Amino acid sequence: MNRLVTQGEKAGLIITITAQTKPSVRHRAGMGDKKKAATVFVRLVSAAGTGFFYVKKKNPRKMQEKLEFRKYDPRVNRHVLFTEAKMK
């Protein structure tokens, strides 16, 4: 426990402030270790070559194959095939 004593402006006035320090905490191996995230973000890139993309979550443990969707590409004004690519 740290103790700080100061004297005020008026004679005879003493102010005592006490501050407690936290005890040191030791890290235990295995306690509170974070797990890897189960999902990753992937980019679905348009096959029309416009550069338009969607972002989607994917759980790689459950689904190992690449994602492919037929979705709307507003740059060519039609539905085209979107294939999975890694996020940059």
Image (cartoon, helix red, strand yellow):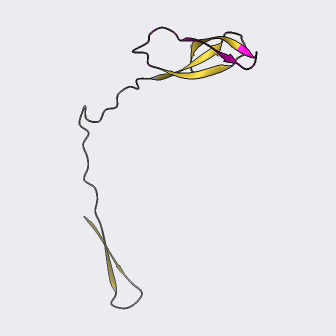
Q: Residue at x 38, y 25 (%)?
A: 36
Q: Residue at x 29, y 36 (%)?
A: 32
Residue at (58% x, 19% y) in the render: 43
- Above or below, 48 against 1 in this view is above
Q: Is residue 88 visible?
A: no
Residue in view at x 71 percent, y 10 percent: 48
| Rendering quarter of residue 46 | top right
Quarter placement of the N terminus: bottom left
The magenta span reads 59-78
Q: Main secondary structure of the magenta part?
A: loop
- Report if residue 87 lies within the magenta region: no
Q: Quadrant of the C terminus?
A: top right
Residue 40 appears in the picture as rendered: yes
In front here: 62 or 28? Answer: 62
Instruction: Choose top left, top right, bottom left or bottom right for residue 86.
Output: top right
Image quarter of residue 70 = top right
- Horizontal and vertical percent position of residue 44: 60, 16
| Along the viewing direction, whichever of 26 and 32 lies nearer the viewer | 32
45 and 9: which one is in front?
45
Residue 64 is inside the magenta segment: yes
Residue 19 position in % (x across, y down): 30, 66
Total tally of numbered discs in the picture: 0
User: Could you say where residue 5 lies in the image, as x and y percent from the top left?
Assistant: 32, 76
Q: Furthest residue to the right?
A: 76
Which residue is nearer to you in this view: 58 or 35?
Answer: 58
Left or right: where does residue 87 sit relative to residue 51?
A: left
Residue furthest to the bottom in view is 11
